[in-house]
Amino acid sequence: MSTEHTGALHPGQHLEHEHKPRGITRWLYSTNHKDIGTLYLLFSLAMLFIGGSLAMVIRAELFQPGLQFVDPHFFNQMTTVHGLVMVFGAVMPAFVGLANWMVPLMIGAPDMALPRVNNWSFWILPCAFTILLSTLFMEGGAPAAGWTFYAPLSTTYSSDSTAFFVLSVHLMGVSSIMGAINIIVTIFNMRAPGMTWMKLPLFVWTWLITAFLLIAVMPVLAGVVTMVLTDKYFGTSFFDAAGGGDPVMFQHIFWFFGHPEVYIMILPAFGIVSAIIPTFARKPLFGYESMVVATASIAILSFLVWGHHMFTVGMPVAAELFFMYATMLIAVPTGVKVFNWVATMWRGSMTFEVPMMFALAFIVLFTIGGLSGLMLAITPADFQYQDTYFVVAHFHYVLVTGAVFGIIAGVYYWLPKWTGVMYSERLAQTHFWCSLVSVNILFFPMHFVGLAGMPRRIPDYALQFADLNALMSIGGLLFGLSQLLFVWGVVRSMRGIGEKASDRVWEGAHGLEWEIPSPAPYHTFDTPPVVK
Amino acid sequence: MTSNASLVRRLLLVCVAMFGFGFAMVPLYDVFCRITGINGKTEGVAAAKPTGIDLSREVSVDFLARSDADMPWTFVPLTERVRIHPGDLQIVEFQVHNLSGEAVVATAVPSVSPGEAARYFKKIECFCFEEQALAAGETRAMPVQFYIDPELPERFKNMTLSYRLYKSTHTASR
C-alpha cells in the first residue's frame, strides 16, 4: 500500500494540538482514542495479574494430590473467577485497547467515530470487575459453577452472589457491545480518502469481523444470564425440568454465544500476526484477499458449531455428525491462514526482533492448540476427552500461546510508536524465552494427564498424576514471574527510558501508523491523509 | 455512506434482535425437539383415541418412576412392564405415598426412550397433565391411559416411559 503525505503528516503541525488535560480528569473524562486505548491496555494488564493469581491458587492446590490449601468450594470459585477474569477482563479488553490505539491510526482517522461512547464503554469495565471480584468476599463466596455457569449449578445450587455475577456480566456485555459498535462505525465511516476495503490492514479487517461477532452474540449471553437470574430469583423455569424447562437448553444457548466468543478472542490476534510477519520478513503478506475471506468464513462457521462443546449430553447421532463435520470445516480457513503466514516468510529477509519471536511462537503453538481442537472435534474421541485436562490444555494453547502471545507481540510491535522509545531488546528477549519455556512446562503435560483421565475442575487427583502436576505448577509459577519482566519492560518504555524510536520504527514496516511521528502525537490525522 | 447515527441505530437493532433471539431459542428449542422428536418429550395434552390396531406385532413398554432423594415421598410404578399391540389401549398406575406430615403439590415430568419413538407414544389421560395435590400422609394410585401409534416404525421393539416427580415450583418457592 502506498501512501502520500498530506499536510497533516508534517510533524511540526501536531505540536500545537498537544493540549493534554492534566491530572485524573484527563483519564476519567477522556475521549481521546489513544488515552482510552492506554486505559484498556493497563486495565487488562492488571486483570491478567489478578486472573493469574487465581490460577496460582489452583496450581498451588494441585501441586500435590490431596487437599492442601483450599476447600473444594473455594477451588471451584477460583476456576470460575479465573476464567471470567481472563476472558472478559484480560483478553477482550486488551484487544479493544489495541483497536482503540491502532484502528484510527491505520485507517487515517482523527479519532474513533463515537468518542464519548468510547469513554463510557471503558469506564463501565472497572465497575463490572469490582462487582465480580467483590463476590469473593461475600458470604457463600463467588460464583463457583465454572466460567460456563451451567444450569442447574448456577441456578439451584449457586450462592447468593449470583445476582452480582449476573449484573457484572451484563455490564461487561454492554461495554463490549458499545466498543464493537464504535469500531464498526469508525471503520465504515472514518477511513481516509482512498482507503478502500481491500486496502484495509488485516488487523482492521479482523477487528471489523470480530466486532460483528460481538454485537451478534453478546446479547445472547445477556439473555442467558438473565434467564439464570429469573430462574434463581423469580420462579421461572427456563432450565428447571420441574417447571417444564430443560437444563440442556442452557448449554445450547450458552454455547451459541460461547463458540463465536472463542473466535472473538483469536481473530484480532490473527490480525496482529498478519501485521508483524510481513514487517520482519520484509515481504508483503501472502494472499491478502484469502486472509480476509478466511477470517470471514471462520466467523460465519463459528455460528454453526456450538454443539461440539456438548457431544456427551445425549444428542442424536445426526446432530453429532453435523457438528463434527462443521467443526472440522473450520480447520480449512484456519489452515489457509497458517500457510499464508508461512508463505509470507518463505524467502523473506527475516530478522528476529521480539514481536517476530512472539508471532512465530504464536504460529507454532496456536497450531498445536488447533490440532488438539481437531482431536476434540472427533465425536467418539471427545467422549474420552470431555471434561478432562486435555480440554484445558487445548484452550490454554489457543488462548494463552494464541491470544495472549498475539497481544504481547502487538504490544512490543507498537510500543515504540506509543511511547517514542525502543524497549530493551535484551529484556524483551529474556521475557520471550522465559515465557516460551515456562508456558510449555505449564500446559504441555496437561495433554498427557488429560488423555490419561485426569478430570478438570477437581481439586484432587489420582496419585499417578502427581509428578506431572508438580511440574505444571512449577511451570505456572515461572510463567507468572516471567510476566513481571514484561511489566518491567512496559514501565521502562512508559517512563521514556530507552533509545529514541524513529517514525517508521521497523525497517520493513508499512502502513499509515508508521507515517506519523514517534511517539504518536495526541491528535493525529486532523487532515485526512490520501491513500493511493 | 450512511451517517454515524443511522449506522449506530441499525447496529443497536441487531443487538436488540439478538437479545430477543436468545429468548426465542427457548420455544424454538421445544418446537425443534417436538418436530424431530429427539428429546423424548411426549405431548402435554390428551391424544385422540386410536383408530386401528396392529395385531401383527407386539411392543414391550417398561415403566420407571424417579424422584430426587430429598423429596418427601415414595414414587413407584405398580406395573413394571406390559407387552401390547400398537393401537391397543392400556391403563397402568403409578403410586405416590406422601411421607411428610404436610400437604404437598407434585408435578410429574414424563420422558420416553428411545427419544425418536416419543411421538408415537400417545397418552389419552395422564396424571402428568396436571399438578397433583397430596394431603399429609396420603397414598394415591395415579393412572395413565395410553396406546402406541400403529405408525410406529418396525425397528422399535422396546420403549420405556419414565416419570420424574418434582415438588411443584409454585409451592417450592413459597
Image (cartoon, rainbow, N blue to C red):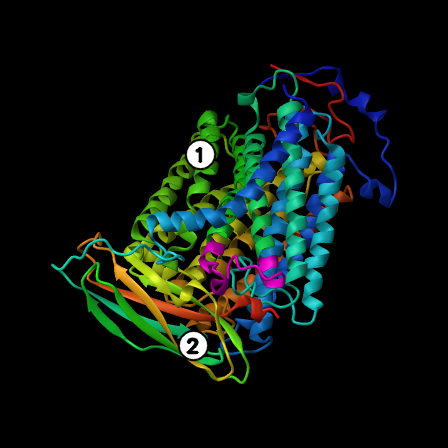
Q: Residue furthest left?
A: B56
Q: Residue furthest right?
A: A22
Looking at the image, residue A397 sits to the left or right of residue B35; the answer is right
User: Which mark is first along the chain, 1 or 2?
Assistant: 1
Check disc 1 and report the residue beneath it.
A297
Local secondary structure at mark 2: helix
Identify the residue at image location x=22%, y=52%.
B151
Q: For the residue marked with disc 1, what is the amino acid?
A: Ser
Q: Which mark is residue A463?
A: 2
Local secondary structure at mark 1: helix
Q: For the residue marked with disc 2, what is the amino acid?
A: Leu
Q: Residues within 10 Å of mark 1 (few under 14, many from 20)?
A: some
Query: x%, y% of residue A520?
Result: 74, 31
Q: Pick whichever, B5 or A330, lies toward us.
A: B5
Looking at the image, residue B48 sits to the left or right of residue A9; the answer is left
Q: Quadrant of residue B113?
A: bottom left
Query: x%, y% of residue A56?
Result: 60, 65
Query: x%, y% of residue A20?
Result: 85, 34
Residue A410 in the image: above or below residue A478: above
Read off the magenta span.
Answer: A228-251
